Every structure is written in structure tokens, then in C-alpha cells.
Image (cartoon, rainbow, N blue to C red):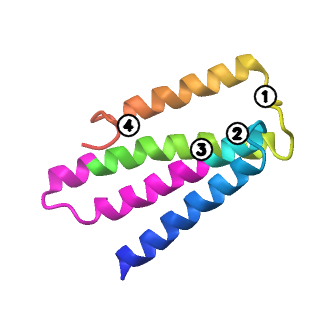
Amino acid sequence: MELTILIVAAVAHVAIGFYAFQHNPRSYTNRFFLAFTLIATVWGINQYLSLHQPTPEKSLDVIRWAMVLAALYSFSLFLTIHTFPSRTIHLSKPWLVLLSALTLLVSVLSRTPLIFS
């Protein structure tokens, strides 16, 4: 039953994301929303997989990937909310670069024993 719900949710997320994107592919709001829905889908699948691993070591690896996805999820949600309802990005380029770099740093650190061991 869990897998069925996951599949339905994943298909719905992807469909909504692509529907919004196809409505106006030039809009940064729609681009960020598509990224958000795709990351949310992968994150949801990852959460399911984290509970169905044969060994604790594999579970730890999948959970570390969940932390990487959580950083990307948060960043894509922030960009979507900050840009909505405009077609352009209102975040200044230095802030965008800084936040992108910090998200990348957190993502890389999430794969190390600094987060979970």
C-alpha cells in the first residue's frame, strides 16, 4: 500500500510541475516550481527507500542522500516562494550566488560523517 501511495504522489508531483512549466516555460517561478516538484518527488522516493534497506550501512547512505535532497528541496522552495508571482528573479545576483554556494556546501557536507555517523 505504501508503494502505491508513493507512486501516485510521485506521478502527481511530476504532472503538476510539468503542467506549470509548460504553461509558461520562460517564467522563473514556473522553472523553480518544476525543480521543486522534481526534487520533492526524488526526496519522497528516497524516504521510502531509506526504510527498506537490507543493512544499517545502506540505510545510513540513503539517509545521507535524504539530507542532500533536503538542502536542495529547501533552496528550490525558497526560490519558488521568493520569485512568485513574478516571471523574473528578484533576488540580487550576489545573494543568489551566496545561497547557491551555501546550499552546495551543505549538500556536500551531508554526504560526510559530519552530519550522521
Q: CA distance from mark 3 to mark 4?
A: 20 Å
Secondary structure of the residue carrying tag 2 is: helix
Q: The residue tagged with tag 3: helix, strand or loop?
A: helix
> Looking at numbered disc 4 in the image, what kind of residue is underneath it?
Ser
Query: Can you tell which quarter of the image residue 46 is in?
Result: bottom left
Residue 110, numbered label? 4
Frontmost of labels 1 and 4 is: 1
Residue reaching furthest bottom?
Answer: 1
- Taking the image as shown, residue 117 lies to the left or right of residue 82, namely left
Q: Residue at x 63, y 21 (%)?
A: 98
- Which label is found at residue 79? 2
State the CA–CA distance, disc 1 to disc 3. 17 Å
Chain-order first, disc 1 or disc 3: 3
Q: Nearer the viewer, mark 3 or mark 4?
A: 3
On the image, the x and y values in percent for residue 103 come to 53, 31
4 left or right, relative to 90? left
Mark 3 and mark 2 in contact? Answer it, CB < 8 Å. Answer: yes
Q: Residue at x 49, y 28 (%)?
A: 104
Find the distance from the CA under tag 3 to the CA under tag 2.
10 Å
Q: Are marks 1 and 3 in contact (CB under 8 Å)?
A: no
> Would you name the residue on which mark 3 appears?
35
Residue type marked 3: Ala
